[in-house]
Amino acid sequence: MTQAPPRQAHAVCVGAFTLPSAGDVRTVREALAEIGRCRVLIASAHLPRSPRTPFTWQERAAMLRDSLDGAEAARVEFVPLREWFDDARNAQALQQAADAAGVARDAVRRCGPARDESMTPGDPGMRDLHPELFAADDAQAALATLRGRVAPGTAAFLQGWLGMPDHQRLREEWQQIARERALWAAVPYPVTLVTVDAVVRAAGHVLLIRRGRHPGKGLRALPGGFLETRETLAHAAIRELLEETQLDVPEAQLWACLKAVRAFDHPWRSQRNRIIVHAHFFDLPGGTLPRVQGADDAAHAEWVPVADLPGLDGQFLDDHLVILDHLLRGLGLR
């Protein structure tokens, strides 16, 4: 007699749940009805608050949990999935999470629209940056437009969040990005922008700045900026590095310490538009840390121990922590 296959222990749902909807809750309930228990994978986790991802993964999980009744919520487990800005690494992380739950990857239930189907990077309509949260001057009017579309727990959370300091700060950032995108929208072809970043290592530390302007005001970041018309990528990286940090190292020495250049081009790496960054890695010799001081677009510059980087989740602009991880691990320096 053939034995029946073992009953699946968990259903698995995955989504970013940046603004949990009634449809997301319905998917989780269907999974609970079919399997009994559900593991919800919260994608785009460990990112800072931004117009694209306004809420921490814990807040998103709480909105979903509060949309379920007590018995349902007791049968749901929430697990964060880090955003790697790399489709292969994201797929690997999803596969590992599915394996841990004993579920085939093709049995994972996807919640919410796929980002590639619902919007385009740099979309002048700002659909990827939640205009429903940030466009209206009246926070309560914004909430009124969302009722019925979002999950009950989401509506309850927004009732207390709209108009508070985090919302106001993100609205300022949203407005800055909207102004930039409106300018680029006049161009008759898709805009792709080229930028440079500097990853500088010295005596077991890396050089970071705090951004002085939106987007990402106050976040940690790599020194860098836009390529100017009459300069090479490497010239731009050194220029931006010196402008933003006043690094007390002669330019000729920086050229000698340039060890690697890597391009980071994921379409979703920046919420400003389609931006490709070329990260330049400088490895300074010796056991001392050169003097630095924040200037230009940087409110502050400082040396941070490489060993401290894993504890700085959610504090970096865009994919800058991923860039550091990629370069330092790839070069065997971490």
Image: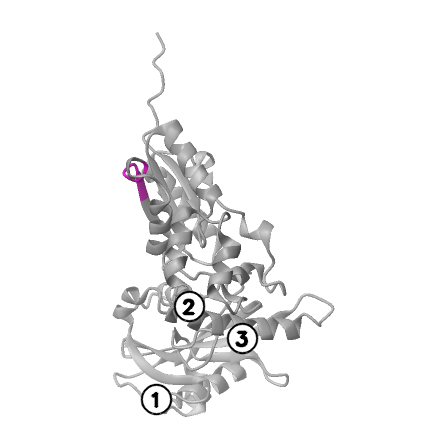
Mark 3 or 2, nearer chain start: 2
Say what secondary structure mark 2 lies in: loop
Q: Distance between the residues labelled 3 and 1?
A: 29 Å
Q: Which of the two residues, 123 or 141, is positioned nearer the viewer here?
A: 141
Tell me the residue at 51%/76% (across/down). Answer: 196
Residue interval drawn in magenta: 72-77
- What amino acid type should be assigned to the residue bearing mark 1? Val
Query: Which residue does the image show at 38% across and 49% down from the upper left?
Result: 153
**Which residue is denoted by mark 2 in the rendering?**
163
Residue 133 vs 299, above or below: the answer is: above
Closer to the camera in the image, 199 or 177: 177
First in residue order: circle 3 vs circle 1? 3
Residue where numbered disc 1 is placed: 292
C-alpha distance separating marks 3 and 2: 18 Å
Q: Which of marks 2 and 1 is nearer the N terminus?
A: 2
Mark number displayed over residue 176: 3
Residue furthest out toward the right: 188
Residue 205: mark in rendering: none
Identify which amino acid the numbered label 2 is placed on.
Gly
Tell me which amino acid carries mark 3: Gln
Q: Position of residue 56 (x, y in %)?
A: 36, 59
Answer left or right for 66 relative to 197: left
